[in-house]
Image (tube, rainbow, N blue to C red):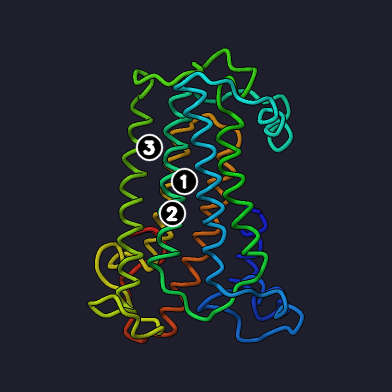
Amino acid sequence: MAFSIVILSVLINLIESKLPVSIVQTFRYGKFSSEKKHFLVNYLEVPKNWFKHFYVFAAMWSTLGFVLVILAFVFKVPVPEFITHFLDMVALKNRRTSYNATATTVAMLCMLIQCWKRFYETHYLSIFSNSKINISHYAIGYIHYFGCIAAILAEAPSPFTSLSVDHQSYFLINDINIRLIIGIIIFLWAFQQQYLANVNLVNLRTDREGKVITYEHKIPTGGLFDKISCPHLFCEMLMYMAVYIMLWGSQIWPYIFFWVLSNQCESAMLNHWWYQSKFKMYPKERYAFIPYIL
């Protein structure tokens, strides 16, 4: 998924005019969707507000994962055998633990609160227009959150894996080290800033009473929006980087982080270019994705 995004992004950014309409329409969505349409691809599009569906799944799936972790590492409840068989099937062969129970618990808690935050935002905060997304984007949302939770459990210590002699299989406050603290600080900062950015976007379409007054796009200002066009995407990347720091040594999470980095970066670039083309007075000093860099 990550490499496909990178390859398609390069093609879209460099030679979009020479690509088949079906590929461009499949890749682009929302406000920067393709103007040219392919009649077959049209049948594979769903409303953009269907994004909220896979956050229902993400909230439930992350809650299940967190409950399993707490039962195993805090209350010493044995993990059902079918769960370890499930992890053997979907993850690595001969799975070996890569981090301790404390790091597992903290990382799973971070994913839990992020999934529930996104559930709240998409159901009770965000204002969706009538734009469409390709059904592949819709499916990828489920795949992503399924993979994130399964990946954390797949390399957790016993009883989730049998090969965990180097790591404690229970939660210990003493295992909270400087790397875990750095990861927590980055995550919480990005968590807050992403929420503030989403509130900022909502305020552009509502009045003081919270009533929707327009679906038009406007130039957001304030906070991180004064530095970059897409702080909500930048913060999403930071949160996954923070979990990567917490789960340092993981064999799977680097791929997840690369996937998030690649798709959030490309989405930010497309948003940035759209803003520049749509608004003549768009701030020239504003970057797309990473302040002062990109």
> Residue drawn at (39%, 65%), measured in percent from left and top?
124
> Residue drawn at (59%, 57%), measured in percent from left and top?
141
Q: CA distance from mark 3 to mark 1?
A: 10 Å
Observer-nearest of 79 and 276: 79
Q: CA distance from mark 2 to mark 3?
A: 14 Å
| Mark closest to the chain's N terminus, 2 or 3 | 3
Observer-nearest of 90 and 189: 90
Residue 159, picture quadrant: top right
- Callout 3: SS: helix
Residue 277 % position (x, y): 44, 83
Q: Which residue is mark 2?
A: 236
Q: Compared with residue 211, is residue 69 higher up or lower down, i.e. above or below?
A: above
Q: Which residue is mark 3?
A: 183
> Residue drawn at (67%, 28%), measured in percent from left and top?
84
The answer to whether mark 2 and mark 1 are in CB contact below 8 A is yes
Q: Amino acid at mark 1?
A: Tyr
Residue 229, picture quadrant: bottom left
The answer to whether mark 3 and mark 1 are in CB contact below 8 A is no
**Quadrant of image for the N terminus:** bottom right
Q: Amino acid at mark 2?
A: Glu
Residue 202, picture quadrant: bottom left
Residue sticking out furthest to the top = 165
Q: Which residue is mark 1?
A: 240
**Quadrant of image for the C terminus:** bottom left
Q: Amino acid at mark 3?
A: Gly
| Mark closest to the chain's N terminus, 3 or 1 | 3
Q: Compared with residue 71, is residue 257 higher up or lower down, i.e. above or below?
A: below
Residue 293 % position (x, y): 38, 58
